[in-house]
């Protein structure tokens, strides 16, 4: 796969420190919807890089202007789980595509390894679903390449259930 970064991207923002073990600073965390704030966008990109390096299928996600434009247009809602110390723990998004009008896709669901088992993914999806329901969104889907079966158990309290296989979920 060919990959390039635009000239305005600071690659050092994503430097993965494999020799440094990150640990959870506190058990309390909150989930918030990210606006087009550059600092929060950088945290989203760091979260993706933490989990994928530069192997994420959509390389444009590492471009601040691209992600900012998606958030500003409303074509993507992004949520970030952060600890009370400001530590980014995970990320999830809701993407509105022309392909399935009115049925957005839950994507980029990830949490950092050091906080697995603490329902970070589940809480992020709960917040996303609550805000989507409040906005009148009738449902959402997650495609097999987008959702790991690891999170299926965390998602069921949000009202999402497997449809056909462990990686496709729907409300209801």
Image: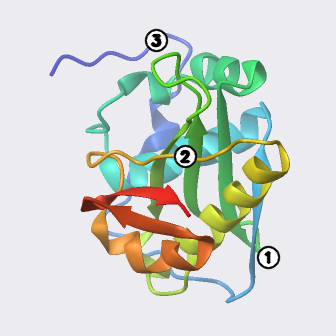
Q: How many marks?
A: 3
* Residue 6, numbered label: 3
Colour logic: rainbow
Disc 1, disc 3: CB below 8 Å?
no
Task: Report the Cα–Cα distance between label 1 and label 3.
Answer: 33 Å
- Please name the residue that numbered disc 1 is placed on: 84
Which quadrant of the view contains residue 147?
bottom left
In the displayed structure, 4 sits above or below 75; it is above
Q: Is 133 situated above or below 165?
A: above
Side of 84 where 13 appears, left or right: left
Quadrant location, the C terminus: bottom right
Q: Which residue is depicted at the point 42% across and 80% down? A: 153
Of badges 1 and 2, nearer the viewer stands: 2
Residue 56 vs residue 15, the one in the foreground: 56
Picture coordinates of residue 135, whole percent (x, y): 83, 42
**Circle on res. 140:** 2
Dot 3 falls on a residue whose secondary structure is loop
Describe residue 1's horizontal placement relative to residue 86 as left or right: left
Residue at image location 67% in from the left, 44% down from the top: 138
Q: Quadrant of residue 27?
A: bottom right
- Left or right: 96 as drawn, with respect to 33: left
Q: Is residue 76 left or right of residue 46?
A: right
């Amino acid at each position: 796969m060919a990959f390039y970064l635009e000239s305005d991207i600071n690659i050092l923002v994503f430097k993965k420190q494999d020799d440094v073990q990150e640990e959870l600073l506190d058990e309390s965390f909150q989930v918030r919807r990210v606006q087009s704030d550059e600092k929060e966008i950088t945290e989203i990109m760091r979260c993706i890089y933490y989990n994928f390096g530069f192997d994420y299928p959509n390389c444009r996600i590492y471009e601040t202007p691209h992600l900012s434009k998606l958030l500003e247009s409303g074509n993507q809602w992004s949520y970030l789980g952060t600890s009370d110390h400001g530590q980014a723990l995970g990320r999830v998004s809701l993407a509105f595509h022309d392909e399935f009008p009115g049925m957005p896709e839950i994507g980029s669901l990830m949490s950092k390894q050091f906080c697995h088992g603490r329902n970070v993914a589940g809480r992020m999806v709960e917040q996303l679903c609550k805000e989507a329901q409040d906005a009148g969104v009738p449902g959402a889907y997650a495609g097999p390449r987008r959702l790991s079966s690891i999170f299926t158990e965390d998602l069921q309290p949000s009202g999402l259930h497997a449809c056909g296989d462990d990686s496709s979920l729907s409300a209801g």
